[in-house]
Image: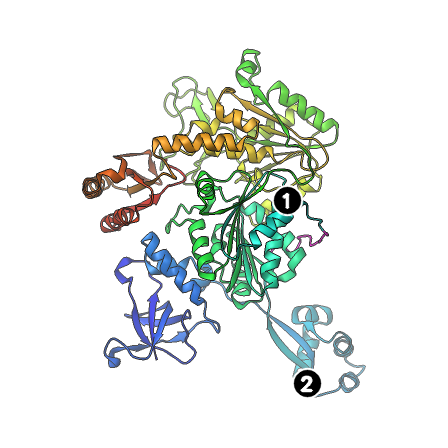
Amino acid sequence: MYADVIVDIASGEVDRIFEYRATEDCYEGSRVTVPFGVKKIDGIVMALKENPEFDKNKVKDILKVIDDVPALTREGLEIVRFVKERYHVTTALALRLMLPSEMRKGKVKAKNAVFYTLNPAFSSVEIISRTGSRAPAQKGIAEFLAKEGRCRSAELREKFGDSAVRAMLAKGFLSEITERENRNPYLSLKKESKAVDLVKAQKNAIETILSRPDGTTLLHGVTGSGKTEVYLNLIKSAVDEGRTAIMLVPEISLTPQMLSQLRARFGSAAAILHSGLSNGERFDEWWRLRTGEARIAIGARSAVFAPVENVGVIIVDEEHDGSYLSETNPRYSTLEIASFRAKYNGCRLVLGSATPSIESFVRAESGVYGLVGMPDRINKMPLPEIEIADMRKEVRRGNASAFSLALRSELKKTLDEGNQAMIFLNRRGYSQTVICQECGYVVKCQSCDVSLTYHLDSNVLKCHYCNATYKMLTACPECGSEYIRYGGTGTERVVQDLKKTFPEARILRMDNDTTRNKEGHFKIINEFASGNADILVGTQMIAKGHDFPSVTLVGILDADMSLYFSDYRSRERTFQLLTQVAGRCGRAEKKGTVVLQTYNPENPVLRFAVNYDYDGFIRSEVELRRATGFPPFADIVRVMVESADDAKALEVLKAVCTETENIRSENPDEFIFFGKMRSPIKRVQNKFRYQVLMRIVSGKRKIVDSVYIIAGKYRTKDVNVYVEENPNNLN
């Protein structure tokens, strides 16, 4: 038997099959170690065959099969082929999506635990009598194990002493058992399961989705309408049928909350996958899914590659969220991978959101997706009333703080009544920029063409693009002035201001700076949910999915900030974000209030958001996109050229542009826009950036594939050239 192997080298020069002589324990999908030149390297068996294509005498042997169970299923191999063809990446790069990186690099292995029992060759009475009174510790071990059956090695040694354990082993009275032990993340999660009476809308949603054995359904339910309970019932239906399930959420902060509910219903059958786990935890959870010990995968974007077989349902919560689009190579769409898996397994794909993306809305309207609506909150409470605070009037009144009088008043009222509040600002740090008042100098990153953000907690300046840190200035490096001003407000500064205004309030902050470790999100959310804080200040990670019954006030600072990004999605994102964050309050029996602060209260997007008028907004936006030729009626394709050498980057840009212009001249009716230019952010991590930007009539796959081929042709070790389709960020 011979094996077609892909070696774990991402270079396009070795992106091909290599033949090896297979061993008996080798299967399709097995991880293997093979000789490769003078090195030994790991790879994946893509296929097995009876006869080689090359001379048998020149075919080398596979050195080792790494795992007892093939790491990749047959479906996993098909996903790899799909990713390779769809996103024009090497097979090795596509394979890396399927395996935990530490496992692939051999940096993590199964954790084994050692236990001791009494040797069954002797009776417990005999062992106890033969230890005698002269060895009380050994007798204690015998009596303890006779009662308990077995004990972990470390615990037994701590309890009775190492010498006593060694003596018992030497006499042959103990048997050693080695077992694999899973590292279980989030052990502190509560697992309380409550009986839930479904309301009519939930029952209708479940029945409608289950009536379609496969295909995609858009579940459009307002915040607080009970979508999570629908998801749990759909998962139960799949598990009851003997199938598996994948549940995706957009933020790592939401995974512990969802895992808690899944564990309450399904126990250890639920496993979590996300980048915040330790290496060992991710390894063990992945293997629990691969071996079938766990049947439900929950996680953020990467969990779409979970190694489960016979999938019965895939659920994508908050389907509109931009985090489902990968911004590193391979630049895949989670929804496309989910759709591929749903078709492969003949299962249901459910996309849930209170504010579906325009692309999903158009597909549902045209009948490509099924559509299920849940227009009311589960408790029949109205959506919170949104009050607009015009910050222009606040400035004229002499109020220079981040809080309007209306928000201060509502905060005081909320705290006096013993309720909780959430303050949303989608900008972390203390201030957005640091400016010299004398000469106007703005402190910028040395590696990126962006201003630095001041972080008060650590008293440093940080670049939010490359994560570099700098010492805080004491004087302007240009003119020497000590008059340094802070421009723009971040979450850190909001917390400081709140502490001054409401010194008795207990305040938590949730952003990328406070949630760096695995438990960061969970601890903050748990602390707030337990009532141990009065105000939660945060970025967009507090805007989605969380359910806090005592929150009766949401304050939205700089509500119109995202409207001014040079991005065709800015209106849509603003509406979605405002609607989502407003939905965090008034979810229980207490009425909720939202104070939305803006310098542009007449903006139609804000007016739609204030009235929760999704239909009005979406129809307005669809017509605007149709008229101007933006997605979903066209595809934005961007070729990015990056290099540490500005001249080389420019040279490659010109070559790429010439070839893509040839495609355009051959297909003039398919191009709505074409242009080459510097990227809006000209330099990131010391690399100069240029782009060719195109808008192509939607669905022209051959043209887009041709652009990928051109980009691949000019990619070298000195110049990175890659393609983005409908990118999240056009900066």
Tally of numbered discs: 2
Measured along the vertical axis of the image, is residue 603 above or below residue 344? above
Residue 206: give x, y in percent of width and height.
60, 51
Regarding residue 646, the answer to whether it shows in the image is: no
x%, y% of residue 76?
Answer: 43, 63
The secondary element bearing badge 2 is classed as loop
Query: Does 574 sit above or below residue 331?
Result: above
Disc 1: CA contacts within 10 A as few (<14), some (14-19) or many (>=20)? many
Q: Spatial distance from mark 2 to mark 1, Cα to Cα?
A: 69 Å
Q: Are marks 2 and 1 in contact (CB under 8 Å)?
A: no
Q: What secondary structure is the magenta-colored segment mainly?
A: loop
- Magenta range is 185-195
Q: Is residue 616 visible?
A: yes
Q: Is residue 464 above or below residue 704?
A: above
Quadrant position of residue 28 = bottom left
Mark carried by residue 201: 1
Quarter in which the C terminus is drawn? top left
In the rendered view, does 494 fall on the left or right side of 552? left
Mark 2 crowdedness (10 Å alpha carbons): few <14, some 14-19, many ≥20: few
Q: Which mark is residue 171?
A: 2
Q: Residue at x 56, y 32 (%)?
A: 492
Q: Hey, what amino acid is under mark 2?
A: Lys
